[in-house]
Image (spheres, rainbow, N blue to C red):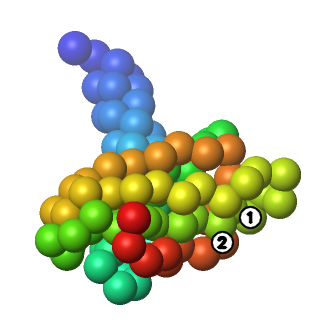
Amino acid sequence: MTPTRRLITAATAAVVLTMTTMAGPASAQTRTMHRGSDGCFNWSWDDGGWLTSTVYWHNTCDERRKLKIVWKWTALEPSIIAVDGDGKGHQDRRSEPEAIYDNGKA
């Protein structure tokens, strides 16, 4: 391999390494995981979705409970979901949640 070709190969590798290193942490920093709990429910959602947000939940109580999710996009009705004791689930919507809370016995 000629010295010029070695220099081009090394420069190309350095550029690719720099772009890969910079893209990884930058894209990870734009996402935020939101976690919380209310009553019998633990919940989480990630604001990194392009069109939708997915809310995940877990009913930590033994009894059937209702989870209420109020969405920021006002055209969407709040979601009221009955969840069995120790039940888990998720729901996607084209909006971020504004409030998530335990809505009592189902």
Query: Which residue is denoted by mark 2 in the rendering?
Result: 98
**Quick one: SS at disc 2?**
strand
Number of disc labels: 2
Q: Does residue 78 show up? A: yes
Q: In which quadrant will I find the N terminus?
A: top left
The residue drawn where x is 68% and y is 44% is: 94
Seen from the viewer's position, the closer of residues 41 and 80 is 80
Residue at the extreme right of the image, as rendered: 75
Q: Nearer the viewer, residue 48 or 40?
A: 40
Is the residue 77 above or below the residue 70 in the image?
A: above
Cβ atoms at labels 2 and 1 below 8 Å apart = yes
Q: Residue at x 73, y 54 (%)?
A: 77
User: What residue does disc 1 label?
Assistant: 72
Q: Residue furthest bottom?
A: 39
Q: Position of residue 12 (x, y in %)?
A: 41, 31
Q: Quadrant of the C terminus?
A: bottom left
Q: Amino acid at mark 2?
A: Glu
Across and down, in percent, residue 98 comes to 66, 72
Type of residue at label 1? Answer: Lys
Q: State the separation of the CA atoms marked 2 and 1.
A: 5 Å
